[in-house]
Amino acid sequence: MKTPDEIKEIESELEQILYGVMDPEIELNIVDLGLIYSLSYDGQSQVEVKMTFSTPACPLGDAILMNIRQSIANVYPEFEVDIEVVFEPIWNSEMISEKGRLLLGM
Amino acid sequence: MNNLQTGNAPSLSVVVPHFIFSALSFLCLTVFIILAGTDVLGPYFSGKLVAITHLAVLGWASMLAFGALYQLIPVVFETALYSELLAKITFWIFAVAILLLVYSFWTSSYGTTLIYASSLMFIAVSGFIGNVLFSKRMGKQNIQSRYVVTAILWLLLAALLGLLIAINFKYPFLSQIHLHYLKIHAHLGLVGWFVTLIVGVSSSLIPMFLISHNLKEDKLNYAYYLINGGLLLLSLDWLVLQGTVLVPVYWMSISLGIILYLVFVWEVYQKRLRKELDVGMKHTLISVLSMLLPILLSLTVMLKLDFQNSFHLRATTLYGFSIIFGLITPIILGQTYKTLPFIIWLHKYKQLVGKYKTPLPKELYSEQLANLQFYSYNLAIIVLVTAIISDSIWMIRIGSYTLLVTAILYNLNVFKIIFHKVKTESNST
């Protein structure tokens, strides 16, 4: 079992990994896009991600989920990643970060 | 994972043949326009012009619409396609029907072959409609799905009337001349099927691609009733009463509906987060804006504002041309780049993302070719419209060859996407 500081550090690393996962249509990473609602690590091997898509029937949703799992597995192969996709609150453009807005040319 | 519908996309073997047939039809269509020569400036009901029209609206536009709708059903209805097998059977029947139909018109053979072709067409359309309706039964009800379902019902009526006209050529039983029914058939197809479908699907896709939110759908609701109510009354008036003084009222209803839709798109455009438009969206927005052209031309034709008789005939040709090449073709040219690369990318890279550095969907086609296609198409349309207005055969030739260039560029990109070979960090260099 990791200490609270170690857990925080790993969560921060996991977030950095998610910065590398792109929405292939919008061409922006899913963190700056505001698709990640929460991310937690239990200190052992369980990672929980609560996220959304820009539209409930996002045709690229499967690819994004696959990318998240694989990107985390590349760094932490022993981790189990549980992703919960929710549509409450529904995603809107206000959720895009400042950096994301700049990258999108908004 | 409540309400997650991402795994509902149909197989590649369902969708891709539609894109291939459609792209090749577009290429053949441009060759047919060159071969038709002076016939393009002749009466709109001549065999060659009717063959070109059917190749355009069925082989090029409807074939792609069928394929794209199979792909879009998970997006619009939020459910999977009812039957992939039915979709594959429908494709082959539809393809044979189109080839037979175009052959019959091009060779002016209005006999048994035309009846067979129209019957197969009706069967194919019924198969497609059954598949969409069964999918919808399982899916979400929203304004977009209402548009799609209404559009396909118009298509069924257009196909049915087409079949009756074909039978009437060999075994006359209809009370009026063919041109009377042809007018209704054309409007059921062009306005009922295409305009309703484009309004419904684009009102879902344009906000998605431009990233626009907080949109009010009340205009789309009003537009739905105005367009479809107007068309229903117009068709019944023409069919039963042979055209009364109320026809301009129905025209106003349809036109107002289209204008409300244009206002909706304008709001989407204003609220868009993605400021830069790619080639797909440029084509799409030109198509949407072009909806104004048939409204103005139909007014000219309806009020017979003909300063000379030949102008009236040309206005009628231009009216049909503006719907097929102003509205339908550019939206297909544009939306191909917003759908096909993603379909192929998902198939090729879904299992590889995260493991390797993969290309983006837009990197599956040549942007340079797509841009050239965009400019050549707009040039071709400006030249062809000028040619029809000025009755100039040499301009028709220039416009036709420019359109052929567009079709070649489009086909190059479509086949580049379809035959894309997987590139990952490890084997791309």
Image (cartoon, coloured by chain):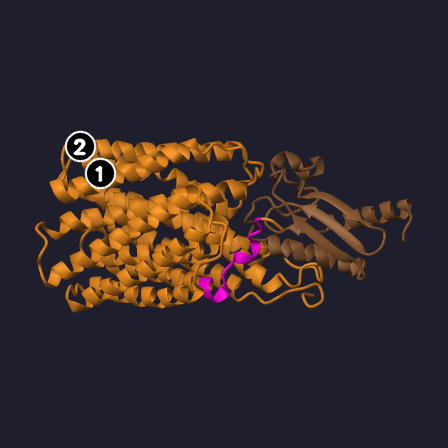
Residue at image x 43%, y 55%? B135
Judging depth in this view, the residue of B48 and B82 nearest the camera is: B82
Q: Residue at x 28, y 63 (%)?
A: B123
**Residue B54 located left or right of residue B426:** left
Q: Determine the chain carrying the residue at label 1.
A: B
Q: CA distance from mark 2 to mark 1?
A: 9 Å
Residue kind at label 2, given as amino acid type: Leu
What residue is shown with label 2? B246
The residue under label 1 is: B233
Q: Secondary structure beneath disc 1?
A: helix
Question: Hey, what amino acid is under mark 1?
Answer: Leu
Q: Quadrant of the C terminus of chain B?
A: bottom right
Where residue B138 sits: x, y (%)?
A: 45, 53
Name the spot of residue A53 as percent of width and height, x first: 61, 46
Is residue B392 one of those drawn in magenta? no
Q: Is residue B294 above or below residue B411?
A: above
Secondary structure beneath disc 2? Answer: loop
- At a point 71% along the width and 38% down the height, the residue shown is A99
